[in-house]
Amino acid sequence: MKKRSLPLARVYQLLESGPVVLITTAHKGRTNIMTQSWHTMMEFEPPLVGCVISARNHSFEMLKASRECVINIPTLELAAQAVGCGNRSGQKLDKFKAFDLTPAPASMVAAPLIAECYANLECKVADTRLVNKYNFFVLEVVKAWIAPSNKNPRTLHHRGRGAFMVAGETIRLRSRMK
Amino acid sequence: MKKRSLPLARVYQLLESGPVVLITTAHKGRTNIMTQSWHTMMEFEPPLVGCVISARNHSFEMLKASRECVINIPTLELAAQAVGCGNRSGQKLDKFKAFDLTPAPASMVAAPLIAECYANLECKVADTRLVNKYNFFVLEVVKAWIAPSNKNPRTLHHRGRGAFMVAGETIRLRSRMK
């Protein structure tokens, strides 16, 4: 999937609709993938993303130690892999191999991009004040990639217990909001 | 629209898909409505919701002073009102009247429910540590209401600049995740 750089000021347009994301981390020669829906935009530019990574997850320690990650956005074709990554722990499993996903080098962080995802956001940890109490990390997106061919991505939106709403039609209204 | 109480443990199932929400506040005899997409679940139970309310918005002062609000979730039928509430400031406008929305009394907070929304979450401010830097409030949902007739709600998901993805079909996969 050919990708181009996306201006950082447009990152919010990918995340504020609330898609399921796959967060990749790297530390000491190992990588991990975590499926996640608990994230929100916090600033337009530089783009800040707030994100809960439970301390029960292997990715929590990876992110705390490396202070870097990539937020990858999958579409419907990757639904089985997204659920698979969520069902299994990365402590003893190489999820890229287990779920037939392709790691691609990022430009500004050590964590890999997932090549099959239509968008990839390279992030550095910006604020850890709410980590102890809520496992809540503030991330700064430092580089963004998108597959320009995918104009109306069929993102996944979790409704709980394995029910996923698939992105439907897009309507346009006259809005003064960004 | 007839509503029933929703167990607090199920609140995340309404929010983690990332819908546009209408946040209502009340203070000193006045109310306001704000359209918003920057929110995330932070805990299952008691349900905590992290939420950015820009200091440029009238709702910021209302929420800071009253420490209470209601998160109302609209569906496609309310798209024009949701955009209208986002385009206008509540400083001099009664948005309930201007957009023909019905305020209904909440049970545990002073802010009103929007009767036309299929779900309403009564909230109290739980943590303000990130308000100064990011306008980020941690809210605790203390009471939740839902219209049980609406099984597959056509929620709105903002893609930026007035483009809204409307919730599509729901698929089910075998997941160990909550």
Image (tube, coloured by chain):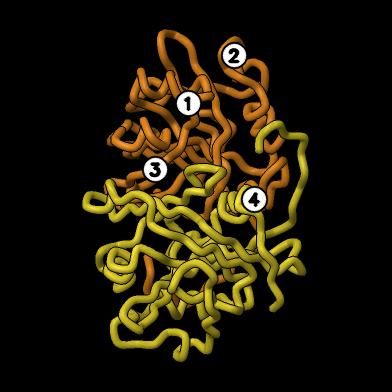
Chain colours: A yellow, B orange
The residue labelled by disc 4 is A10
Relative to B95, is A38 above or below? below
Which is more foreground, mark 1 or mark 3? 1
* Mark 2 to mark 1 CA distance (whole Å): 19 Å
Image coordinates for residue B66, horizontal then vertical, percent: 35, 19
Residues behind callouts 4 and 2 on a single chain: no
Q: How many marks?
A: 4
Residue A13, visible in the rendered structure:
yes
Foreground residue among A176 and A165: A176
* Mark 1 to mark 4 CA distance (whole Å): 21 Å
Q: Is residue A58 left or right of residue B149?
A: left
Residue A163, visible in the rendered structure:
no
The circle on residue B136 is none
The residue labelled by disc 1 is B55
Q: Residues within 10 Å of mark 3 (few under 14, many from 20)?
A: many
Q: Residues within 10 Å of mark 1 (few under 14, many from 20)?
A: some
Q: State which tag comes first along the sequence, 1 or 3.
A: 3
* Mark 4 to mark 2 CA distance (whole Å): 32 Å
Identify the chain of the residue marked 4, using the numbered disc in the image.
Answer: A
Q: Is residue A137 left or right of residue B19?
A: left
* Mark 3 to mark 2 CA distance (whole Å): 26 Å
Relative to B112, is A99 above or below? below
Identify the chain of the residue marked 2, using the numbered disc in the image.
Answer: B
Which quarter of the figure is the N terminus of chain A placed in? bottom right
Residues behind callouts 1 and 4 on a single chain: no
Foreground residue among B168 and A153: A153
Q: Is residue B22 left or right of residue A87?
A: right
The residue labelled by disc 2 is B94
Identity of the residue drawn at 59% across and 61% down: A144
Q: State which tag comes first along the sequence, 2 or 1.
A: 1
The residue labelled by disc 3 is B50
Q: Amino acid type of disc 3? A: Gly
